[in-house]
Image (spheres, rainbow, N blue to C red):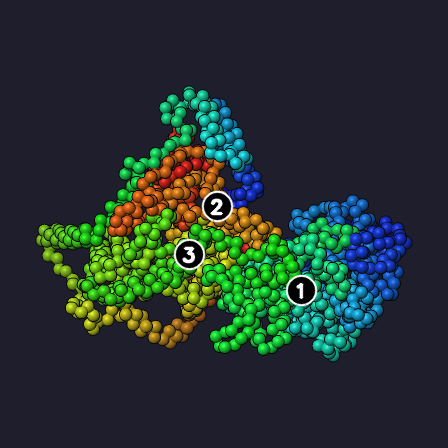
Amino acid sequence: MKKKSSKEKANDVGVSEDVQMVENLVPTKQEKKKDKLSKKKRKGKEKEKKARAGTIDKHVDENEVHVQDKFRKEGKKKSNGQLVGKSKAAQEDEVYEIPSGDNDCSKGMKKWLTDYHQCRPGLKVLQQQIDDFIISYEEKLEQERKEKEARLTEGGWVLVEHHRGRKKTTDSESGTTVGSVSQAAVEDKLAKKKSKEVSDFYRFQKREAQRNELLTLQSKFEQDKKRIQQMRAARKFRPY
Amino acid sequence: MDFKIQELLKEVRLQSSPALTKLVGDTVSAIKSALDKIPEDLQVTADWAPGFVRDIGADKAEFKFRKPRSIEIGGSYSLGCVAKPDANVDLLLRLPKECFNEKDYLNHRYHAKRCLYLCVIKKYLKSSSSIQKVEWSTLQNEARKPVLVVYPVPKLDEVPGLFIRIIPTATSLFDPSKLNVKRNSVRALNTGDVSLPTPIYNCSILEDMYLEENSNFVKKFFSGWKELGDALILLKVWARLRSSIYVHDCLNGFLISVIVSYLAAKNKINRDMMPMGIFRATLKFIETHPLWKHGLYIPTIDQNASLKGNEQLNSLTQFNLAFRISSVAYPELQDEVALTLRSLETCRDGGFEEIFATKIDNAAKYDYCFRLNLKGNRDFCSLGFCLDDECWRMYEQDVHSLLYQGLTDRAKFIRVIWRNTYSDFNVENGLSALDCEPLFVGVLVSSVEKAFRVVDIGPNAEKKDEALMFRKFWGEKAELRRFQDGKIAESTVWESEQGSRHLILKRIVEFLLGRHLSLLEKDIVSVVDQLDFSLLHDGKDLVSHSGRLLGTFEELSKRLRSIEDVPLRISTVQPLDSAFRYTSVFPPEPHPVANKKVDVARLHNLTPFCVQSLEVMIQLEGSGNWPMDDVLIEKTKSVFLLKIAESLQDNWGLTCTASEEDVDVFMDGYAFRLRILHERGLSLVNKEVGRDQTKRISAADKILFVRSQHASMINGLQFRYPIFGPVVRLAKRWLASHLFSACLAEEAVELLVAYLFLKPLPFDVPCSRITGFLRFLRLLAEHDWAFSPLIVDINGDLSQNDEKEIDDNFTQSRKAYKENTQIESNAMFLATAYDKSSEAWTRCSPNPLELKRLVAYARSSASLLTKLILQNQTDPLGWECLFRTPLSLYDAVILLHGDRLPYPKRLLFTSELNQGRHVAHGTASNCFHPFLLPADMKGSLEQLKTKLMVNFDPLRCFVGDVEKEFSNGLKLWYDSLGGDAVGLTWERSKKREREEEETDEKYPVDLLRNIGELGKGFVRDVYLLKAPRLSS
């Protein structure tokens, strides 16, 4: 994780920290490139120069950035010439211009706008779309089921389906629930019934319970100890 | 708890090591030898410290120097109870009787000589080689009693900043009976011919006279009683964390040790007690025994009857050790003790965190903080600096009584503290420079309703005298008013809008200070509204529209429930959006076009193009005909919604727009987005017993259900604590402006803030937005996320079993994490009654890394905010910094076109970056404008309505596209509330290691350009700050 304390970026403190960060960063870059060609090294130094200039002078406006970029580009072209013989490399340092893309529907703002409007064709159309979808989806499900059945019967097997024996619990006309209890309620009841069992009827049960309690206490003790250690590591015990 | 106490003691206690003993011994002997060099009979006159002698008004301040009678180590070092980080050794220096006359207790002569004596010592100490520097300080902020602070040259690593204080004592210099509280010793203090008693002055001398005796008394108990020492350290840690009681007019380390030994002497503490037992007993004693009224006297052996209580009797010979505790500070101390005792009983883990690890400084404790800059103000010391009491203390009292009278029952406590000593204080120059620190006023509000009261009713007009007093006090603010019950009374009215009621208290304080103490506005810094700017949209607080919003919602739900041409009737309608519970940073403003009738001509120039939608949940009556398949259920819901929309359109003429997922209804300027909760899931959600059951509930239903539960609970909470809403909004705004929108769900923030209100210990419930916000930041920064769950018990209905269940869930999730670090889940464990395993909001985010970043940000913001509240900083820039995120902390930054955001006015600051590598620049698109253009308004109303975009957010689209395209390897940080910067960090993935070196250079640049392409017309600039780290 990086350093994050420089919240007061606008303050002077922040500035000096930024510089520090850059300075820390630069040497590592150089080290990495040590075994590379010396020309690359020169480039690294230039970068460093640029970075420093950029950070120390906080008020560089955009124009200046452009100027600096150009300057660096030239320097790089020279050094890059032999290194990477690709045409793209030359472009690398230019500030790449992204077009506004007002005529291009595949990306960016225009795309999002068209997407948005396409999603809203109007209520009627939507209704139709969904209906179509449901019908085709149901057909698909049906077909899958049939296929499965067909595959099974093909091998001479007859599929004996177990219909879940739940009676119809809702009146199809009014939609109200008739009789029957929901499954969750049944389970709840069952759970309640179970809890009524006497747990300390036999002596061995009591003994076991006691032992269990002791064990959990012990493990909790161990856990606490561990936690304290971790907390100490995190300097939690310094109230200052 | 016991473990933790042990650890705490180990950490805090200054262990005596041979090196330390040697250092102290060496320095003391160096001081002694320096003293030996002072020639006997050196004539000392007032010229040694002319300023001081002049300012305290002493005469006849001259004597011949004699060596001190004795030099002894006293204080906590001699008890072995020094609590870090203050490592100091008190050296008691007995002043020789020969230097003083019998009558020197009069008119500050003693103080002057005492000071001059120290001046001489200082001069000779300076020449000593083993002493680095000698500074002045004061005893308990009492300027007339300076002490010398000596820093030795050699330093010990284990005790950084060790220093030695030289404190003169005046054992048996004067006759104590002459210094009775009833007697006058400063002749200048009189009314007419009658001279007034000077109790405080007398006590000030008595303190010095009995200092040695008292410290011997204390030493007697502490030697060879380890538990007592431990308890003393605990008490010191406890008191030091509470800066409102560890000050000059309340507790100090020495006083605590006296109290403890007093209790030991009275057998209230016996030898079988554990440190915590002693701690508790001492607190109980402080809570019940009125120290301030009765005073605290050392019991002597032969005088075992009526030790305390009868003040007159004892004060003849004894001296009240607690004389500094003022009548104002004592109730505050009692309250703090009561809170601590409550924490001990009710908090998790014995309240260790609350009592010994939470800093209760003034910024977090008081709801309203004021700083009075009195530098150069001469009014307060017109009578001279010191009479009976010192002028600074008198001024504290004046300010307190003024505010107390003015704020009446609005305030629970008002605390006025003026710290006078500063680091390079120099006695020789006099006391006039002691006003350079600002005076601090903290107000603890009794209840928000009272603090926000608009009208204060004074005395009845018939009571002439009282009415006159009232008028005199309030001046032009007092009005004679007739009230509804027919009463005619004097009153003051502080008219203000609903949204700015929190400013009333500030206005009162500023008015009173200006009127009675003639302070200028620029000298009063009130910390009340400095953060409000972040919640304003176009200069006004949008919450003021909430009343209308709720009205519209009521109407809509009535209409929805009366719909008849849809197969199933709508049974319930419930709001989901945070705007309904006053916790949205920017609740939507009524949009002029999203209405039934629109006056196109009256649309102003800056009508926004987008409408925020408000989610509303509806439930249909039961039916058996619902499909069983998840996909089909969702589709069926959409069909229902479309039918409902049609019905609304036909019957009420409301405009509706719909996409396949959402249906939005325009009504009265708001856009409501409807969602259906399918009741089949509902009955099962509550009883998650096994895995298979949870699976059956469709995910969408579950989320909806949890959200509705959350919405109703928070809504209830919000009514209980009116200040809850603003604090949540500040917290959300802070998170968003530091680009954490993706990390922490809105609901999670609400729960975190709710926790502050539900479990305020060791504080009171926060009653101002800044205090609440500060505590939110501290909670985020200090809560032990890795090892403890945060249980938010909104309605107070969690039973012991529930808590145990939560704990079990927590340990389980941590265990799973330990076994497989790949599952980064639940780094922040937030449990509530409706969600006991923290699955709803924080399951996926923040992940441990994000949380770490979050905590670090919260910590630095909290310390910045504390500094802003307590220290002299008036510029608004500092406050803005709280919401200005440093962009240099990301690997790459994407800046957006601020004027292509849907609500450009919500942008706090335009982000600029001038470091890193400028990789790409984009031009803004012309297709989208945040405001309606004149061309748009030309078409018919219907056309205009279709042009409005509900919930259109280019930022969200952009983030979605980028995440879809480059799902692994990078992470975006953004501000969903209208920031124009997106931060980007590389995720350390193993994949990239394999990539070839040649691509290293280009890879990030190309990638960033591609990302820029995805945001065509929206992205302004792309900067690369740091290439992904490659392990070569």
| Quadrant, the C terminus of chain B | top left
**Up/down of B29 relative to B556, above or below:** above
Question: Do callouts 1 and 3 mark residues in contact (Cβ within 8 Å)?
Answer: no
Report the amino acid beneath label 1: Asp
SS under mark 3: helix
Viewer-side label of 2, 3: 3
Report the amino acid beneath label 2: Thr
Q: Position of residue B882 (x, y in %)?
A: 51, 49
The dot on residue B398 is: 1
Given residues A133 and B37, the one toward you in this image is A133
State the residue position of label 3.
Answer: B542
State the residue position of label 2.
Answer: B885
Q: How many marks?
A: 3
The picture quadrant where one finds residue B331 is bottom right
**Up/down of B467 relative to B573, above or below:** below
Q: Position of residue B698 (x, y in %)?
A: 27, 58
